[in-house]
Image: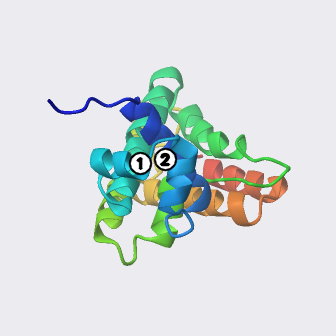
Amino acid sequence: MPWGKNFDVEATLDKVMHAFWTRGYEATSMQDLVDCTGINRGSLYATYGDKHTLFIAALERYDNEMRRKLLSSLEEHYGPREAISQLFKAFLESISDKGNNRGCFLTNSALELAPHDRSVGKIVAHSQAQIEDFFARMINKGKKLDEIPAHVRSTETARGLLASLIGLIVLTRSRPDRSLLHSILDDALRRIG
């Protein structure tokens, strides 16, 4: 009879996700993952596979649990212009004056691994395309509701907003100056009228 799992697989994956999100792939050892989960190395390997497979599972969980739910919630609870603003503000509000700003796990992974890791690159590219689509949807909806001027070019503006958001996320880690980051938000909002 096979052994049953003596731990919550999803809760454990959340702990792993936070470890990789905080430290990055290279700086997180299997021992770090054992320590943060309280699960022995053999059980982690048996359940999730090797470190890379575990990282991919954690990155996909972040994409599903954080990015998708955030965009869905913004679209559901705010008008188009405010939904765009709130996405930027979600990252501004996560800044700590004490440092240790984690930014976005997807963006961090894009910078660390996407150039040479095809699996990570695919996840990140798909996520970024979904964010760009969110911006384009909000712009188109905003134009129909007269919240955004009709002359705003949806595709080009959505791409510019994506670039601004990624830049803002990177700066939350490397240069978390609130006035700088708010100026990026202000510039992004000027693009939509």
Three-letter residue code for mark 2: Val
Decide which of tag 2 and tag 1 comes sooner along the chain: 2
How packed mark 2 is, by other alpha carbons closer than 10 Å (few <14, some 14-19, many 20 or more), is many
Q: Toward which corner of the image does residue 147 lie, by quadrant?
A: top right
As drawn, 151 above or below 29: above
Residue placed at 61% from the left, 54% from the top? Answer: 22
Tag 1 residue: 58
- Residue 103 coordinates in the image, percent (x, y): 62, 53
Residue placed at 50% from the left, 50% from the top? Answer: 34
Q: Marks 2 and 1: CB-CB under 8 Å?
A: yes
Q: CA distance from mark 2 to mark 1?
A: 7 Å
- Residue 39 coordinates in the image, percent (x, y): 46, 42
Q: Which residue ends up furthest to the bottom in the rendered image?
A: 116
Q: Which residue ends up furthest to the top in the rendered image?
A: 77
- Residue 57 coordinates in the image, percent (x, y): 35, 49
Tag 2 residue: 16
Residue placed at 71% from the left, 50% from the top? Answer: 186
Q: Which residue ends up furthest to the left in the rendered image?
A: 1
Three-letter residue code for mark 1: Ala
As drawn, 104 above or below 14: below
